[in-house]
Image (cartoon, rainbow, N blue to C red):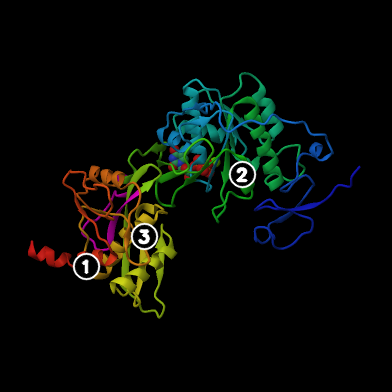
Amino acid sequence: MAKPRVQFICQNCGTAHTRWAGKCDSCGEWNTLVEEGTGGGIGSGPAAMRSARKGRPVTLTTLSGEIEEAPRIVSGIGELDRATGGGFVRGSALLIGGDPGIGKSTLLTQAAAALAMRGHRVVYVSGEEAVAQIRLRAQRLNAAETPVELAAETNVEDILATIAEGKRPDLVILDSIQTLWTDMADSAPGTVTQVRASAQAMIRYAKSTGAAIVLVGHVTKEGQIAGPRVVEHMVDGVLYFEGEGGHHYRILRTVKNRFGPTDEIGVFEMSDRGLREVANPSELFLGERSTKAPGAAVFAGMEGTRPVLVEIQALVAPSPLGTPRRAVVGWDSARLSMILAVLEAHCGVRFAQHDVYLNVAGGYRISEPAADLAVAAALVSSLTGLALPADCVYFGEISLSGAIRPVAHAQQRLKEAEKLGFAQAAMPASGEDQNGGNGRRAFQPATLSDLVVRIAGSKRREAED
Ligand code: TYD
Ligand code: MG
């Protein structure tokens, strides 16, 4: 019999090392190596697989052929179904990640209740909370009377034996993956080996029976699903549940989806009765807007297929420091430096003596370069002290040469803006007929200096009017 081998597994990336070290060579993280038994690590398989076995040929096939639509279980919670791409897919595994306390268990309790009410068999397995706690939450969510089957259990074999009884469940929720452990692996619960082996067992169960499973995963401070990053590769879909402390809204963001689009979001609001769907996020993000203050510009953005209007706020103030401060919340700070550089180099707007603060209202995060124009407008507005027109939206990408470049989905952005009462738009010029013949006043600057001139000239125009 082979001598049991000891391995050191990185708890961050899952790489197996033969010797302990302070730093993982693979991902560069410090203090993440933990001694675990054999059988773990990337590249190793089940013990039975490692003994030599003669292979069995499989039938090769072609790329073309019949395609089946993924069979889905629709929850009826519109924002959740949107993020999953139209409902949970039978026989698939979905990972929902998020910070502790963000509302993952709340969301899944609501989803479980909604599905159970529609006649699906739903099993909710919690490894974190006692049955009484879950019941208390269900009561608060008005879901206590729904036929959801509940268990507080952490052992994978016991869970599988439990759900094998009776009709095959349509959905199994495991809250959370970090608490699960299986007899197949001999490391402590919560280690990469255990999490991976447990997830693998549950995914195998899903694939073989056609039940949909949802795994809940906690996220570390650095924004990674703690330890088991490896789980992300194994599942069919990854959703992140995000929110900012102090704000009530939550965003369910699709990061990976083998059965649908990956750029969708679902928007919710946390209330004392659970999560409420927000069908029109723009109204939420533009909620308490003061229209007369300089430094605020409304950005017409897109989240997946969905237009979202958000306010971008800039504060440019004289700096007492040799190296002025640049602080950004909700946007990329490198991108801000770029816009500042373009404004300085091509438009003669100087920020060298000023601190610059940029904030995206409502704790929202923007990743689109289309926000460039709105950021530039907010910066110039704050520097000059001239408020931007209250009924104007901004979008467009700025190139290093100072040119305004077109962005996708202009029509959709404009439509959303119009719906919310914005009569003007500053945006890139493009071939399309942007006005759509409905009387909107579109300002299409070719370069950033055109926009600066327009903002700086707004005072004079006001005086003339
Ligand atoms: P929870 O779903 O337990 O978070 P997670 O599973 O992601 O750790 O939600 C925890 C928070 O949500 C908690 O601070 C209380 C709050 N909450 C409400 O505000 N309203 C509600 O109806 C519920 C059930 C929770
Ligand atoms: Mg929870």
CA gap between label 2 and label 1 equals: 50 Å
**Residue 364 placed where, x, y %?**
39, 52
Say which element carries label 3.
Answer: strand
Relative to residue 88, is residue 395 depicted above or below?
below
Residue on which disc 2 sits: 233
Q: Earlier in the sequence, mark 2 or mark 3?
A: 2
Residue on which disc 1 sits: 453
Specify few, some or many for label 2: CA neighbours under 10 Å numbering under 14, 14-19, or 20 or more.
few
Does residue 389 appear left or right of residue 269 in this picture?
left
Single out the mark in the foreground, 1 or 3. Answer: 1
Does residue 127 appear left or right of residue 271 in this picture?
right
Q: Quadrant of residue 314?
A: bottom left
**Residue 204 placed where, x, y %?**
67, 32
Say whether marks 2 and 1 touch (CB < 8 Å): no
Dot 3 amino acid type: Asn
Residue on which disc 3 sits: 359
**Residue 20 placed where, x, y %?**
77, 59
Q: Earlier in the sequence, mark 1 or mark 3?
A: 3
Can you see residue 464? yes
Depth order, front residue of 50/111 = 50
